[in-house]
Amino acid sequence: MKAVVYHGIGDIRLQDVPEPRIEAPTDAIVRITASAICGTDLHFVRGTVSGMQPGTILGHEGVGIVEALGEDVRNLKIGDRVVIPSTIACGNCAYCRAGYFAQCDVANPNGMGAGTAFYGGPSATGPFHGLQAEKARIPFANIGLVKLPADISDDQAILLSDIFPTGYFGAEMAEIGSGDTVAVFGCGPVGQFAIASARLLGAGRVFAIDQHDDRLRAAQSQGAEIIDFKREDPVETLKRLTGGVGVDRAIDAVGVDAEHGCCGSQPRQPRNGQWQPGDAPSQALEWAVQGLAKAGTLSIIGVYPPDAMTFPIGLAMNRNLTINMGNCHHRKYIPRLIEMVLARRIDPAKVLTQVKPMNDVIAAYEAFDRRDNGWIKVELQPQRRDSQGSEERVMDQAVADTFPASDPTTMQNPR
């Protein structure tokens, strides 16, 4: 079968690999009908998150059809259409039972203290082969697969695998309540869903900070007040637009690869051309802390490597800020978000900007890495699935489209 395989920093290849097989009674084999490229994948390919093993299949977002089941998977049957939560969890340990699926004690073979296990990641996460492939082995499939209603399309479902739950998780960790003023740093796919989720949770105003026109337009189409940090200082602008107070809540939705430096300021430079351990840039975090009102809340869902050590702790402490962060517990949120999609409270497919066949995956990675105009979220199709046999579809990201699908001011808090 074909799969996207990591060989080294800047070196990924579409190649033939052996098909997966059942290895444990709780496994399933899923034929992938939709996958996606995520900003986290770029962290691995760029080398800003280390520890990737050559030969690892990339990708942690997937939708597909169950083809084989281990004997202990009792809640699914062959032929079921499913979405795959990006993080892997056993469902039995104390953390899973408390809803902390991303901190499962069992799933990560590196031991109880190893932290989150997910598909297509570095050695510290398992590693597990990823979902940018024609088929995938899913461990703990009874908890690691969620059946999809027929009314939810693959285009919608692929956003439920990772980035919609992550954006919603970030908004929930930000402790957003009715009327709150919120700043979202980074308007990529996760940032778009953080904006949407903030509105679903009742935010009164949402500011979106980025430098890319297409991403800012998408945020503005959701009703966010946009700030281009190439043209103005985001902290000064946030303070001015909030009467000098700052925002109640802030979400870092970009992480270690944030592009930074604006308004004539000089971004910090890596030593000897490379970032050293502890030096990973955190401009988005600095802006978030500076732009928050006293006693505000910062939510961090952008990915940072374990050796990232820099943070404006003094300013945060002296202003009584609350800081929540972590990897998303996807399995906790997916059923809730499926209900929102079915109720037409939101259409996640509006974030998709490109749908590409697997054969075009390397070029798609390159365009996404360059942040080409209009490339916000890329779906991959390992299998042809439309009646015309078309292998490519480019979604029209019209600014006039309403997103979310219905007016969030009329919604009840879903928690």
Image (cartoon, rainbow, N blue to C red):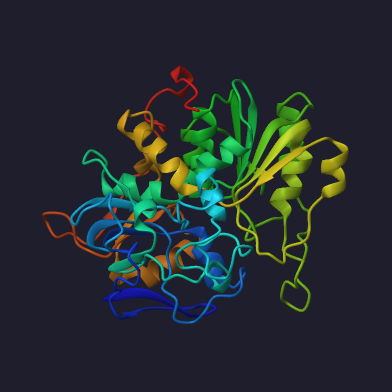
Residue ID at (33%, 29%): 344
In the rendered image of this protein, does residue 387 appear above or below residue 13? above
Whether residue 353 is visible, yes or no, is no
Residue ID at (44%, 17%): 410
Of 170 and 103, nearer the camera is: 103
Q: Is residue 379 left or right of residue 248?
A: left
**Residue 388 x %, y %:** 11, 56
Of 401 and 321, nearer the camera is: 321
**Residue 216 x %, y %:** 53, 42
Quarter in which the N terminus is drawn: bottom left
Of 236 and 48, nearer the camera is: 48
Whether residue 185 is visible, yes or no, is yes
In the rendered image of this protein, does residue 253 appear above or below residue 276? above
**Residue 268 x %, y %:** 78, 63
Taking the view exactly as shown, the residue that stands out farthest to the top is: 410
**Residue 383 x %, y %:** 22, 63
Of 395 and 163, nearer the camera is: 163
